Image (cartoon, helix red, strand yellow):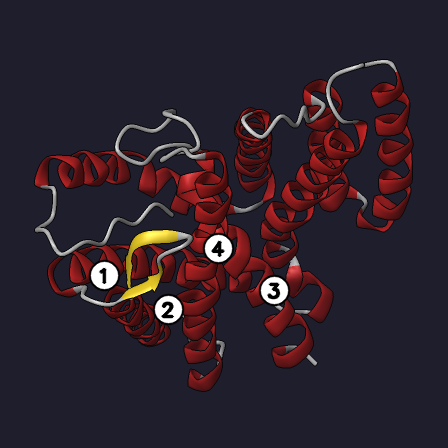
Amino acid sequence: MTTIQTEDLVNYKAFAVRTLVAVIFGPLIVLCFWWGHYFLLGLVLLIVLLSYWEYARLVERKTMQAQLVPGLLAVLSGVLLVYFLPSALVAWIFFFGTLFFFVEMYRKKGSAVLNLAATFFGSIYFTLFVGSFLLLRQLPALFGLTYDAAGRWMLLIVLGTWLCDTAAYLYGSYFGRHKLIPRISPNKSIEGTIAGFIAAILAAYICHLWFVRDLPLIHSLVLGAIVGSFGQYGDLFESMLKRDVDVKDSSRLIPGHGGILDRFDSLTISIPMAYLYLRFVVLT
């Protein structure tokens, strides 16, 4: 998620726009995660399609021509398979991998190696990492738990991510003095990162007391730590891509927030890690 941390005070106008958009769309996103089923499927499809489109535009700045239509078809069908038939994902990789090779032979646009690499990476990354939203939401069904259990876990992760993002932004803006990774994100500070991590754990603790009663406290706190660490690395990963192509935002689709990649970058890393923790540690 786009986080600007400098020694200057907060840009209140920009922060007000960010807050207004979050107040309008935030509850809808939270409800999609809570309701699950086709509501979450629709949200995930929207995220992967727009994310791949933004990604294809970004890599063009590095003279790579990711295949747009085949890539969009790949992420669309891949997410549907994650939801309806995850056992077919290996066949999906074989099919679209072969399709990408055939399409590239007739394109004659730049480097075939770079184009294929960009297309493969974008298709698999967005399908599997964003598709993990669906895997986590359906996880309880595999272990005889209620469907709402994962809804509560998802709310903890989403709310923790947003609080982490906000705390890192505000604290880093006022008190940030030491740069975290200047080469990737020159405005992000160590102080803001620590504040975001603490805020995520605090959010997890509050969520545990409020509505996540089916998880022991230690597991809720670990989820908060995953959100506060891997979520911020998701932000850094996207910053690395944008830095490489010399852009500030992935697009201007969301006023005050940039693009879809900017808004969901933290969740795209933290939710897969949370899924692995819940699947192979908590539910074993």
**Looking at the image, residue 283 lies above or below residue 122:** below
State the mark number for residue 275.
3
SS for callout 4: helix
Q: Which residue is identified by label 1?
A: 167
Label 4 neighbour load within 10 Å: few <14, some 14-19, many 20+: many
Check the picture and name the quadrant holding the C terminus. Answer: bottom right
Amino acid type of disc 3? Tyr
- Residue pictured at 68% horizontal, 61% vertical: 141
State the mark number for residue 137.
none
Q: Which residue is identified by label 4?
A: 234
SS for callout 2: loop
Contact, mark 1 vs mark 2 (Cβ under 8 Å): no
Gap in angstroms between the C-alphas marked 4 and 3: 15 Å
Q: Which residue is identified by label 2?
A: 211
- Residue pictured at 59% horizontal, 46% vertical: 130
Please indicate whether residue 212 sits to the left or right of residue 187 in the image: right
Q: From where the camera sits, is residue 6 visible?
A: yes
